[in-house]
Amino acid sequence: MTEKYDLTIRNGTIINSNGSIKADLAINNGKFVAIAEKLMPGNQDIDATGLWVMPGGIDSHCHVEQISSNGVMTADDFESATISAAFGGNTTIIPFAAQHKGMSLPKVVSDYHALAKPKAVIDYGFHLIVSDPTPQALEHDLPALIKSGYTSFKVYTTYDKIKLDDGQILDVLEVASKEGALVMVHAENNDMIKWIAQRLLDKGLTAPKYHAVAHDPIAESEATNRVISLSRLLDVPILIVHVSGIEAVKAIKSAQTLGAQVYAETCPQYLFLKASDIDLEGMQGAMFCCSPPPRDEASQEAVWTGLVDGTFQVFSSDHAPYRYDESGKLPNGDKTTFKEMANGVPGIELRLPLLFSEGVLKGRMTIHQFVALTSTQHAQMYGLSHRKGSIAVGLDADLALWDPDKKTTIQSKLLHDKVGYSPYEGMHITGWPVTVINRGQIVIKDNTLQVPKGNGEFIPRLRPAPLNQTRKSPERAGFLKSLKHKHIK
Ligand code: DUC
Ligand code: ZN
Ligand code: ZN
């Protein structure tokens, strides 16, 4: 008699980004070991009749136990953020080990590990935030960290305390290109935003809704066009995060059409929220303020179209949870101006259910596009495909089993983050991931967490796929060669 499998999932529909089959799945030692029409039950067996068996979600943009540029700590630590992520169908997150000026990157990373290891309930990697590209960081720390599996980093064009100027962004792009990392960019023009904000404040216009006025879509599209030019100058890929406005979407699409190595991410807040949601009584609009802000219907439509036509490779939460009180959004209570509020909205638990309900079930995208945008392409973009992002023999057994008919009314009190509100409160959605499995262990079942904290593992990442696809245009290659001779040792 042959050994029994550790776990089998039988009678479900297995869905990947490239197709689906009705089949059974077997898992041993945390990996998929068999996919076949009919398998014998394992030591543990899940009957997935009527369920859609999909790769666990990968949320490659979330802020967890991170101090913002103005010194505010997120409401979620690694425990609450990963529990909330797991309840929402995710099995891996990639938050940011954030460098503030003067900090050493290796210390930032080791401190972040100390926070994550005892608390995470699902797997995680770390991006870096680079705000101080000193010679030490550029020549030693980043190359060493990239080799150790931190193969992506975010840079900002805005926020006085962390922004890089164009020359510094070029320095970071150059290191990324040499060492094999992907640079993510927050693209908004800092001076435009500050200029508008100061005029609003001078007129006494301080309410949360003015946040969306200050963060004009032209500030986003200007910086987007600029960083695309920086990327093209060096022929180095970039990924523009949290794209919100129709003009930025158009700029990215046209750069891609020209063959530029420009990738992009968008988030639920740009599909389901609008600038008009910020226009509420008192300070309540603060709960909808993120950067870039939600826009108008035309932008929402452009973002939907971009998700379906391939302009966007990844759909992430940008979960940036700040409580609606003095510890978070409102440091000066109801006197807080829009400039003083922490920027960000929660969404780690709702990212997948929102897109499933409004994207797949309403016929805007196929279920395969959903899997690509929420899992497979995150693995490809960020160097995780050797472990995650698909249901295939040899990969980590990371799964979300979805009940496509389950109806939910979103209520923040039913979510598992610590932020205390949801910008999507009251929305009616259909479909929910009812069982979640990470490396073969059942993490969520019967609406209950099944693993202790500390169960998640750090996953070092490989060179991201876009870098392997890099094909230097002959014209840029010539330019870079001449630059090498003239200016670069
Ligand atoms: N950028 C983010 O990526 N998240 C929240 C706020 C911000 O500015
Ligand atoms: Zn950002
Ligand atoms: Zn973010």
Image: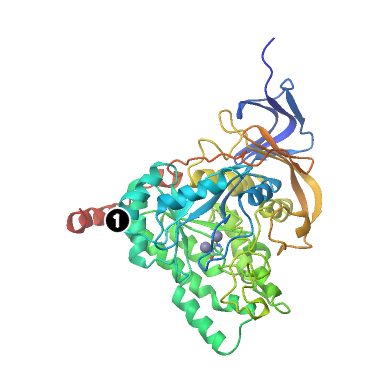
Of all residues, the one furthest to the left in this rendering is 486
Answer left or right for 10 relative to 62.
Answer: right
Write down the quadrant of residue 449 in the picture: top right
Q: Which percent across, then down, holds residue 93?
A: 58, 47
- Work out whether residue 410 can be spotted: no
Residue lying at 20% horizontally and 59% vertically, measured from the top left: 487
Which residue matches tag 1?
476
Residue lying at 70% horizontally and 24% vertically, measured from the top left: 37
- Label 1 SS: helix
Write down the quadrant of residue 155 in the picture: bottom left
Rendered view: 181 above or below 13: below
Q: Which percent across, then down, holds residue 295?
A: 61, 71
Name the one closer to the observer, 199 or 405. 199
Q: Which percent across, then down, holds residue 191?
A: 44, 77
Rendered view: 325 above or below 4: below
Rendered view: 110 above or below 24: below
- Work out whether residue 125 can be spotted: yes
Of all residues, the one furthest to the bottom in this rendering is 203
Residue lying at 55% horizontally and 58% vertically, measured from the top left: 66
Answer left or right for 13 relative to 128.
Answer: right
Of all residues, the one furthest to the top in this rendering is 1
Name the one closer to the observer, 477 or 93. 93
Name the one closer to the observer, 55 or 88. 88
Answer left or right for 69 relative to 415.
Answer: left
Disc 1 under 8 Å from ligand 2? The reply is no
Question: Dot 1 surroundings within 10 Å: few (below 14), some, or many (20 or more)?
Answer: some
Name the kind of residue labelled 1 in the image: Arg
The number of callouts visible is 1
Rendered view: 229 above or below 9: below
Considering the image in quadrants, where does the N terminus appear? top right
